[in-house]
Amino acid sequence: MKTLFSSDFTLGILGGGQLGKMLLYDTRRLDIRTRVLDPSADAPCAIACNEFIQGDLMDYDTVVAFGRDCDVITIEIEHVNTEALQALKAMGKQVHPDPEGLGIIQDKGIQKQFYLQKNFPTTGASFYPGVVTLEDAVREGRQALPFVWKSTRFGYDGKGVKVIRTAEDLNDLPHVACLCEELAPIAAEIAVIAARNAQDEVRCFPACEMVFHPEANLVEEVECPASSPAHVLAEAEVLATRLIRELNLCGLLAVEFFMTKDGRLLVNEAAPRPHNSGHFTIEACYTSQYEQHLRGILGLPLGDPALHSPSVMVNLVGTENHSGEVYYQGAEHIMALDGVYLHVYGKRQTRPFRKMGHVTILRKTLAEARVLAKKVQHQLKVISK
Ligand code: ADP
């Protein structure tokens, strides 16, 4: 391979959102050349990469043409054309995550079947090609209520997920292939981000706990260390390590788990890229998830993922009833607080619940960080002008 640093070596990134933008902080620090593909001309990455190309991530020809001039190709969003990635791999390009593993993850139905076949603990599920066959199954008593309906493709941030308690709840479901999962009795939701390189070295970031917004089904806060029992967190690391190897992925794999009320650990879903639950690693760990992803996909030794400070990460999402040009109300107030780190993604337009930025709070104890996080949530609002 060409030398990575200060050379013509080019890393291609499919997707130009905030995860890509934060990945670019580290490519800049390490002087690694980048090209980014995104459909939107004003994507957050556009200002920070060496070369920005506007185009459709799902279009075969666009993705192949984009990747042809790159040495290594990675993603910051799963919804990309995997056949094009297969073709690039066949041309001798390095593609991480591996298109085969990505294909398993892209489809929630195939992903669930993979967990069941490989004996990962997970909720049971049934699979339907569309809402009509699901309605038949409910009417005939073959599909028990309640359950969690999930569209197999293109769901994210709680879109494409709905708890179904009665037959009436089926009425406004879209006509797409779906899986229906048993409703897990959730006590806590935790995530472990594992990283792997081509030498099969695997290291995990410390488990964090995700706290959800009750209405939007969006992660409101991420706390690290997680407060679940130590043996549960250790088990989560073992499962994340096994999963990244079974999927044969290099780079990151963020694995989301449910801890049930009776203390069992269930795999919910995984993402083969930097993840919202890992933003805290930028300030709170010796190596950030973004640098670790680069190390994993570029065949470099993995960095130390240990936590050096308890942290709470607060997602900044657009306030309800506010759409239009964004204004970060109260930013000056929270920036006066010690241990508070503001990240603004660079999206000019806000919409209700759109992810616009985040704040990481570091304190000597998690309890202190939580108090400060409440203050930040109270004082900082993402509104339209
Ligand atoms: P997304 O890809 O949109 O994040 P998830 O599959 O992670 O979708 O589901 C979003 C949220 O819905 C989860 O974080 C959890 O709170 C809830 N949920 C998902 N599956 C189940 C389940 N089987 N039982 C109970 N709650 C669930």
Image: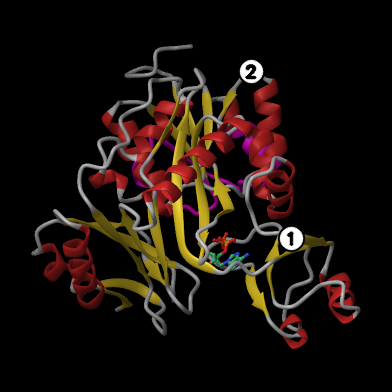
Give the answer, above or below, for where 381 lies relative to 34: below
Lower sequence index among marks 1 and 2:
2
Say the numbered circle drawn on residue 92.
Answer: 2
* Residue 44 visible in the displayed image: no
Q: Which residue is mark 1?
A: 125
Q: Quadrant of residue 181?
A: bottom right
Q: Amino acid at mark 2?
A: Gly
Q: Nearer the viewer, residue 326 or 24?
A: 24
173 inside magenta stretch: no
Q: Which residues are magenta?
A: 38-66
Q: Nearer the viewer, mark 1 or mark 2?
A: 1
Which residue sits at x=52%, y=67%?
186
At label 2, counting other C-alpha atoms closer than 10 Å, the crowd grade (few under 14, some 14-19, many 20 or more) is few
Q: Amino acid at mark 1?
A: Ala
Q: Secondary structure at mark 2?
A: loop
Image location (x, y in percent) of residue 340: 17, 59
- Determine the quadrant in which ligand 1 lies: bottom right
Give the answer, above or below, for where 307 lies relative to 98: below
Which residue sits at x=13%, y=68%?
332
Q: Is mark 1 within 8 Å of ligand 1?
A: no
Which residue sits at x=64%, y=75%?
163
Q: Quadrant of the C terminus?
A: bottom left
